[in-house]
Amino acid sequence: MTELAGSAVQAVCAALLDMGLAAAIGLLVLFPRLERASVTALARTTGRWLGLAAPAYVAVAVCVMSGAGPADLPAALGTVLMHTGFGHVQCLLLAGCALFACALRLAGARGRLAAMAVGALMMLVARAGTGHAADAGWTGAAIWIHGAHVLAVSAWAGAVFVVVLAQRQPPGPALAHRLSSVSTWALALAFGAGAVGALDTLSAARAPWGSDYLFWLLLKFAGVALAVALGAFNRWARLPGLCRGNAAAAGSFRRILLAEAGVLVLVVAAAARLGLTMPPG
């Protein structure tokens, strides 16, 4: 696998992993307003998604880091996972995925929910510890700011994904209001933490203009701006009609929500590629 091809495959695997993490967090933040059958079905699907995406991401990342081919991958995996900081973080990621995927096997709704929450938290910490912010170490502020940004983007995108996937018809007023509330605080946190992180990275660069890092950063911001515009229109122009039982407004709300979900898929993909792009020197 060439370096360019390996980097592209790693970015795709990272994006798929981050979408799974977003769905997991979206399930948790919307849990009080979701039907139990929908929670069970989506949690099972998300667990299977993560069970494929996480090992694929780790395997490809190890290949890219070590230059190992398929025949050498088992030995390279053992070395990286056991003897490097990156590998230790990926062990946490895999453990979190396994816990989330197995949560439905536990007896009792509270035990299942707690296991899902702990598994999602482990994955969140692992993803925060994989990006550029981790270079400063776990005691630095950068990694926790990045972690807050990952949490916020995952909650926002995941909540939208979950509402779209939970049912084919428009959401009810309670779920729509919960989605709006989650999106509002998540957007504020994502913007604040993301702006601090981006300014910290770019302020240290001598020539950021024209860099690949800035390209992906601006593409991500453009996607966020479009998603915000769609969400704001839904919140102020369509949600009141949905709450009044207006069928046309409810149908429009779902169509706009589908468009927002599509844009957020691109945002998550751009963010995954950004995380693998070296910041400008």
Image: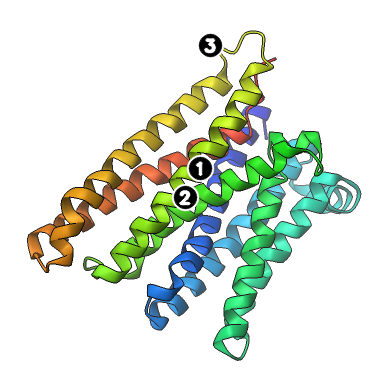
Numbered badge on residue 210: 3
**Separation (CA) of disc 2 from disc 3:** 30 Å
Q: Of tags 2 and 3, which is closer to the observer? A: 2
Distance of label 1 from label 2 (alpha carbons): 6 Å
1 and 2 marks in contact (CB < 8 Å): yes
Residue linked to disc 2: 186
At horizontal 40% and vertical 45% (from top left) the residue drawn is 264
Query: Residue at image x 67%, y 30%?
Result: 2
Is residue 234 visible in the rendered structure shown here?
yes
Point out residue 60 in the picture as x, y percentages from the top left corner.
68, 45
Tag 2: residue type?
A: Ala
Q: Position of residue 100 (x, y in %)?
A: 62, 70
Q: Nearer the viewer, mark 3 or mark 1?
A: 1
Type of amino acid at the residue the image marks with label 3: Gly
Q: Residues within 10 Å of mark 2 (few under 14, many from 20)?
A: many
Query: Which residue is nearer to you in this view: 88 or 58?
Result: 88
- Which sits in the foreground, 184 or 97? 184
Residue 14 appears in the picture as rendered: no
Q: Which mark is residue 190?
A: 1
Depth check, front residue: 57 or 128? 128
Q: Looking at the picture, which amino acid does disc 1 mark?
A: Ala
Task: Tell me the tag on residue 35.
Answer: none
Residue that protrudes farthest toward the top in the picture: 207
- Residue 195 lies in what quarter of the image? top right
Placement of 211 over or under 149, stated as above or below: above
As drawn, the residue found furthest toward the right would be: 83
